[in-house]
Amino acid sequence: MPNTHTMTPLRRGFLRSMIRWLVIGLVLLWSLAALILVAARWIDPPTTAVHMQRRLQAWIHHTPYRERYKFIPLSQISPDLQHAVIAAEDAHFYQHHGFDWHEIQIAAEDDLEGDRTRGASTITQQLVKNLFFGTGRSILRKGAEVTLVPVAEFVLGKKRILEIYLNVVEWGPGIYGAESACRYHDETAARNIGRQQAARLAAILPAPLKRRPERMNNYSAIILKRMDQMGW
């Protein structure tokens, strides 16, 4: 029979030790992510958490997988495509500092009414999620994302955030970035994409593994209207 008076302090000490090492581990991981964001100001990401997630899923399920990923400067991406993605994903991209509190409030109200029809994640939030967390959802992931978004905004700036996002975001099975997406879906370079094509490409971003640009006429029309309203 174990002595409870002896075991209880040992267990408490073990628990404290585990919590301490867990906190240290989380702090180290967060610091590494922050350093990667600093480096990303000058170095183009060679891969992302989403890229690695898809490779792992293909390996686990023994499915064919071909990755297309080519990083290009923002200047080589059509302004129409840049504008379409902003209009579709984050209309207040240039006004907020990482979080669109107005959209968050609308999304929260929709949740309370059981009528959630829109997301509230900004392009900066989506970039952080793509780089470090993949497509999974958890409270821990969301907490880490919230603390890294201000770092991304501070060290990268809007132009670099948009450039990296457009280059790493998923645009189909194994299709990452604007250049690969334009080559795959429209058989042309990202610099040549026109307004209509851009709106259709932006329309598939919420569900890139299921949607196809040629089927997105209704949503692309909404995106084009938003672009008009934004003066693009």
Image (cartoon, grey):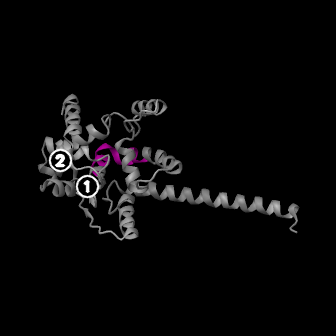
Residue found at x 45% / y 56%: 33
The image position of residue 143, as x and y in percent, is 51, 47
State the image quarter where residue 5 is shown. Answer: bottom right
Secondary structure under badge 2?
Answer: helix
Looking at the picture, does residue 109 appear above or below residue 85?
above
The amino acid beneath tag 1 is Gly
Front-most of residues 27 and 225: 225
Sequence-first tag of 2 and 1: 1
Residue found at x 76% / y 58%: 12
Looking at the picture, does residue 130 appear above or below residue 1?
above
The image position of residue 132, as x and y in percent, is 42, 56
Q: Mark on residue 48? A: none
* Magenta segment, prevailing SS (helix, strand or loop): helix
Residue found at x 38% / y 68%: 61
Q: Which residue is mark 1?
A: 177
Front-most of residues 174 and 24: 174
- 2 or 1: mark nearer the eye: 2
Where does the magenta region start and end? Answer: 151-163
Mark 1 packing: few (<14 Cα in 10 Å), some, or many (20+)? many
State the image quarter where residue 26 is shown. Answer: bottom right
From the viewer's perspective, is 96 left or right of 195? right
The amino acid beneath tag 2 is Glu
From the viewer's perspective, is 190 left or right of 131? left
The image position of residue 142, as x and y in percent, is 49, 47
The image position of residue 25, as x and y in percent, is 57, 60
Residue 162 lies in the magenta stretch: yes
From the viewer's perspective, is 228 left or right of 138? left
Q: Which residue is mark 2?
A: 214
Secondary structure under badge 1?
Answer: loop
